[in-house]
């Protein structure tokens, strides 16, 4: 058997199946495209489900892939065993109703023995106990020794998931030798020992299972084989662990070099940390390369969990500062030829990791200190369960994923109250939902939930702003009404309307509906199941059901909204150009006076990036690009490169909006006919709205003019207030700044002198308790930093001194406990003292042994806090 590298094995496998007429398809993204049942792609066949189910036509009836996969179900075992990993590659060969068992087994045998040159006497196979066909192929066609063909039951050799396609399978094993076995005479595949490694599974999907458990033959059976690339590499390279495979070991060695800690030196804990970092580096690099960003939900949470777990184990190895963003380059170097997207996005991958590392490093030490305090307290109280409230605090305040807290506690023989944690988490979500939920919208949903709105409305607003329609329903609340009278407001359903209903982030049209005897103002338009509901206030006359009305959309309002919607598409394209193609829409709001665009990005945009984005949008406006709309099958739109957002909302036919050569998106909104009609684009603000999501607010056209007028008014009023004119504002501001700086300096000098006097008085009034000088003093309108400086001055000149200061600003109180160094040697601890001192004033806090601070709520209890300090001493 030749020792082949992992990259060589991948190439050999795919080249072999290409020679058998298989279409070589590059790996699908780790993000499932259309499978909502999966968070991440976890097997080679997962992205091919639509082909196996007959929902889509594959590019070829024969296909081969090497699929990137992530599995986190047994993450707790990663690093502790030699075979568990979160990231792995799965080699596969597939037939969609083409060839079947004979070809699959025959070609598999050829690959194993002639290409990979595995020793035949080390190979074993298993078949489903009732699959005589597969057994006969192995025995009579291949000539495989009958004594090494094992029949196994349904649990081992039959593949099915609920109802639908299923079938028997044949697994191929490698015999590692007696030294890995259990010693039993009948040891063979199916035994729980480590002797036989299953490395390739051939699944023969030939049946369909119904809800009653009955099986019927499929008209077109399929083949799905899967070979773990790392697993076959361990066999061919003669190693016992996936971490010793050449490509993985290359990454592991870089971790060893960075940490300065030897691998396999007899220290189990450090070996575990090295393996965890190695595995998680592979996962995070590939996940970010496929567009996943760290967050607190879904696959983003998986990424954050892996990244922070690796960062923590780096700390355990003694690695100082950020390191993952550097070491991911080793993953890209060793896998970049097979997965070129890693090289293309190398800078982006490093930046995302660096930002997440930085976020976590700012809190990890404090969080770890708190966990240590929790564990010490639990052990003192002979407890092993950490309360859910404290677990939630670690998650919410210090960014510790639940699983990371569990892992740390487990190392100390403790566990987390998971149910209590979940209750606190759900409570937080309920508060967030309550804050965001609009009562008015809730009332509208409740009002029309049980009302039959009738047939769908024909929307004509793309072609015209003026049309006629028939009133099919009038209702107020839950009740249909016969007529709408002057001064009243109700909901009006029309069979035909030019009014755009609020959807896709775009605000609705405004305007009027009228007859010879009625005029009404359209205040709002919503849509439910393709029925357009108009909220109409009767200005004059009476409107009745079945009457024909004239509809007139407010032209100016529609044009302003269209400008902003087209500008949103240009903004999206500009952001992808400036920041990268990872940018995707995460929400939008388009109204007549402004636009708001939410997008995926991992950090705040720089001033230069914002200016560049604005300049690109205005450049596209000045090019006077034609804006066109076409309806086409969604498949055709995807082939043309249209950006489809929230694709689950679209049907088979979609509306594609193109802006020259700049932008092409699926969109149901209204737009200008030419980009030049937007006039001008002005970016107002950029901010964060959620983890990994940024928001831009902007204006166009006449709104820019209004903004300029507003700014001019502010400048004029400010200049008048500062007794200058607009052109002299900068010089005036510079002068005032220097004045303020000088005054602040005077105030600081005054404070310093006052504190010096106070210090003399404090020592005169100081109490000596158990040989320790205790200084206590409350300072009004002083910052806590002032008190820190004061305590530092005391430490320079005095020994055996404990200071307990209070800074009082209005109703807010901040305590500071500071101890001279010699007291630390005697066992005094400021962090422990301040907890009880602050508690006496209704507060809490903590800190280090030499200095700690805490907040409190009741200024009247400051004397009680000082008394507690005396008691503690």
Image (spheres, rainbow, N blue to C red):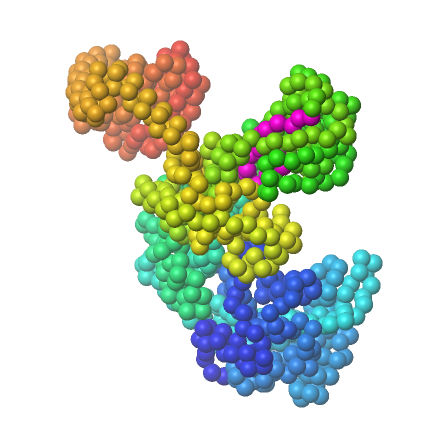
Q: Which residue is painted at 67% across and 88% down in the image?
A: 143
Magenta stretch: give its range: 498-515
**Residue 154 image point, x, y percent:** 74, 67
**Residue 307 image point, x, y percent:** 44, 51
Q: Is residue 263 above or below residue 554?
A: below
Q: Nearer the viewer, residue 561 or 221?
A: 561
Residue 189 occupies quadrant: bottom right
Q: Is residue 632 above or below residue 153?
A: above
Q: Which residue is painted at 25% across and 16% down in the image?
A: 720
Decide whether residue 514 is among the magenta residues: yes
Question: How many numbered marks are there?
Answer: 0
**Residue 789 image point, x, y percent:** 23, 25
Decide whether residue 237 is among the magenta residues: no
**Residue 32 image point, x, y percent:** 57, 56
Q: Is residue 35 above or below residue 148?
A: above
Instruction: Report if residue 489 is visible in the image.
Output: no
């Amino acid at each position: 058997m030749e020792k082949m590298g992992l990259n060589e094995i991948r190439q050999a496998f795919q080249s072999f199946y290409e020679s058998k007429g298989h279409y070589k398809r590059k790996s699908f993204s780790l993000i499932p495209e259309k499978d909502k049942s999966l968070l991440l792609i976890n097997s080679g066949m997962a992205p091919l489900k639509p082909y196996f189910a007959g929902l889509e036509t594959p590019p070829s009836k024969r296909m081969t892939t090497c699929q990137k996969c992530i599995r986190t179900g047994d993450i707790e075992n990663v690093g502790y065993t030699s075979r568990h990993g979160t990231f792995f590659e799965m080699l596969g060969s597939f037939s969609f109703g083409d060839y079947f068992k004979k070809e699959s087994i025959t070609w598999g045998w050829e690959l194993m023995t002639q290409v990979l040159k595995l020793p035949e006497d080390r190979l074993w196979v298993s078949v489903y106990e009732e699959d005589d066909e597969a057994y006969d192929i192995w025995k009579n066609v291949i000539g495989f020794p009958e004594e090494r063909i094992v029949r196994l039951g349904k649990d081992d050799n039959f593949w099915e998931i609920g109802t639908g396609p299923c079938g028997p399978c044949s697994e191929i094993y490698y015999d590692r030798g007696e030294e890995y076995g259990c010693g039993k005479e009948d040891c063979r595949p199916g035994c729980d020992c480590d002797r036989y490694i299953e490395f390739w599974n051939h699944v023969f999907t030939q049946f369909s299972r119904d809800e009653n458990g009955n099986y019927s033959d499929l008209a077109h059976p399929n083949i799905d084989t899967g070979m773990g690339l790392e697993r076959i590499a361990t066999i061919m390279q003669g190693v016992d662990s996936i971490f010793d495979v050449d490509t993985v070991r290359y990454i592991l060695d870089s971790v060893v070099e960075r940490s300065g800690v030897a691998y396999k030196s007899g220290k189990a804990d450090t070996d575990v940390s090295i393996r965890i970092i190695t595995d998680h580096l592979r996962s995070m690099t590939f996940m970010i390369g496929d567009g996943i960003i760290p967050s607190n939900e879904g696959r983003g949470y998986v990424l954050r969990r892996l990244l922070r777990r690796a960062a923590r184990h780096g700390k355990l190895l003694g690695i100082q500062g950020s390191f993952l963003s550097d070491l991911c380059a080793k993953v890209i170097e060793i896998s970049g030829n097979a997965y070129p997207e890693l090289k293309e996005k190398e800078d982006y991958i490093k930046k995302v990791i660096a930002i997440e590392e930085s976020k976590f490093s700012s809190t990890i030490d404090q969080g770890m200190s708190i966990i240590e305090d929790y564990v010490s307290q639990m052990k003192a109280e002979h407890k092993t369960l950490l309360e859910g409230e404290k677990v939630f605090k670690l998650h919410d305040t210090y960014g510790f994923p639940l699983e990371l807290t569990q892992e740390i506690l487990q190392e100390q023989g403790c566990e987390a109250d998971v149910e209590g944690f979940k209750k606190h988490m759900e409570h937080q979500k309920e508060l967030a939902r309550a804050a965001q939920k609009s009562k008015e919208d809730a009332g509208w949903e409740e009002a029309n939930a049980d009302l039959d709105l009738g047939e769908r409305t024909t929307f004509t607003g793309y072609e015209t702003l003026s049309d006629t329609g028939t009133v099919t329903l009038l209702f107020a609340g839950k009740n249909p009404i016969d007529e709408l009278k002057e001064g009243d407001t109700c909901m009006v359903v029309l069979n035909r309307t030019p009014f755009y209903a609020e959807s896709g982030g775009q605000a609705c049209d405004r305007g009027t509906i009228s007859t010879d005897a009625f005029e009404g103002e359209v205040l709002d338009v919503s849509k439910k199941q393709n029925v357009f509901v108009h909220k109409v206030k009767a200005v004059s006359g009476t409107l009745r059901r079945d009457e024909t009305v004239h509809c007139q959309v407010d032209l100016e309002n529609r044009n302003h909204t269209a400008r902003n919607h087209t500008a949103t598409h240009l903004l999206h394209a500009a952001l992808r150009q400036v920041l990268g193609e990872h940018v995707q829409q995460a929400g939008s709001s388009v109204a007549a006076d402004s636009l708001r665009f939410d997008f995926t990005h991992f950090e705040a945009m720089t001033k230069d990036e914002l200016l560049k984005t604005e300049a690109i949008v205005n450049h596209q406006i000045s090019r006077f690009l034609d804006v066109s709309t076409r309806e086409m099958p969604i498949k055709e739109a995807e082939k043309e490169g249209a950006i489809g957002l929230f694709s689950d909302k679209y049907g088979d036919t979609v509306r594609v909006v193109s802006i020259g050569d700049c932008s092409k998106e699926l969109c149901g909104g209204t737009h200008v006919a030419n980009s030049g009609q937007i006039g001008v684009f002005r970016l107002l603000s950029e901010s964060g709205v959620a983890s990994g999501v940024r928001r831009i607010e902007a204006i166009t056209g006449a709104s820019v003019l209004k903004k300029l007028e507003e700014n001019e008014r502010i400048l004029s009023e400010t200049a008048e207030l500062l007794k200058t004119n607009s052109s002299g504002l900068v010089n005036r501001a510079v002068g005032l700044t220097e004045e303020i700086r000088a005054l602040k300096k005077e105030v600081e000098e005054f404070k310093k002198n006052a504190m010096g006097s106070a210090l003399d008085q404090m020592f005169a009034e100081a109490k000596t308790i158990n040989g320790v000088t205790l200084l206590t003093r409350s300072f009004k309108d002083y910052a806590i930093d002032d008190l820190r400086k004061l305590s530092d001055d005391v430490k320079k000149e005095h020994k055996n001194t404990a200071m307990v200061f209070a800074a009082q600003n209005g109703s807010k109180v901040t305590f500071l406990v500071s101890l001279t160094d010699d007291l630390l040697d005697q066992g005094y601890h400021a962090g422990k003292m301040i907890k009880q001192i602050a508690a006496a004033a209704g507060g809490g806090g903590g800190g280090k042994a030499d200095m700690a601070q805490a907040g409190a709520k009741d200024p009247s209890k400051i004397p009680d806090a000082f008394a507690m300090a005396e008691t503690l001493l």
